[in-house]
Amino acid sequence: MSKEQIRQVLKEHGKFSAGIDALTDDADLYEAGMTSHASVNVMLALEDAFDLEFPDRMLKRSVFESINTIHAAIEELTV
């Protein structure tokens, strides 16, 4: 599992107006244009890509706020 894989999911499902390649790993994805609706699509795509399920306690904005927070959540679920 890599941050590059997370970026790929974000590119395909995040519906950003600008490319996310320029964003740092700790950039706020919502400030960059991701809507709450798009974040649900991103969450579902991440679940498929990494063969996991986000528990209810992780279904909050802060978990999907940046590439780093997504990466940390996935690491926690796959250890």
Image: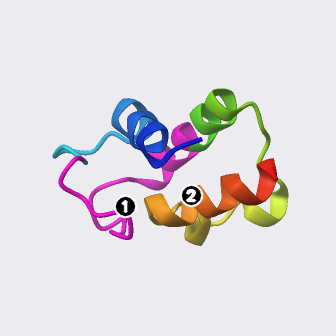
Q: Is residue 33 magenta?
A: yes
Q: Is residue 7 above or below residue 59?
A: above
Residue that carries the numbered disc 2 in the rendered image? 70
Asked whether, in this view, residue 61 is left or right of residue 19, the answer is: right
Residue holding disc 1 = 29
Image point (16%, 46%), residue name: 18
Q: Main secondary structure of the magenta part?
A: loop
Is 20 rendered above or below residue 73? above
Q: Nearer the viewer, residue 15 or 63?
A: 63
Q: Say whether disc 2 or disc 1 marks the residue closer to the N-terminus.
A: 1
- Looking at the rendered structure, the kind of residue marked 1 is Leu
Give the residue drawn at x 40%, y 53%.
Answer: 35
Frontmost residue, 46 versus 74? 74
Picture layout, residue 16 above or below residue 48: below
Residue at 58%, 32% (x, y): give it.
Answer: 45
Image coordinates for residue 2, horizontal then vertical, percent? 52, 44
Image-quadrant location for residue 38: top left
Name the residue located 49 percent from the left edge and 54 percent from the top edge: 36
Q: Residues within 10 Å of mark 1 (few under 14, many from 20)?
A: many
Residues in magenta, as a range: 21-42
Nearest the camera: 72 or 19?
A: 72
Whole-percent x, y for residue 77 in the image: 79, 53
The answer to whether 24 is drawn above or below residue 13 in the figure is below
- Circle number at residue 45: none
What kind of element bears circle 2? Answer: helix
> Within the magenta stretch, is there residue 44?
no
Colour mapping: rainbow
Which numbered mark, 2 or 1, is in the foreground of this view?
A: 2
| Occupied quadrant, residue 19 | top left
Query: Which amino acid type is marked by label 2?
Result: Ile
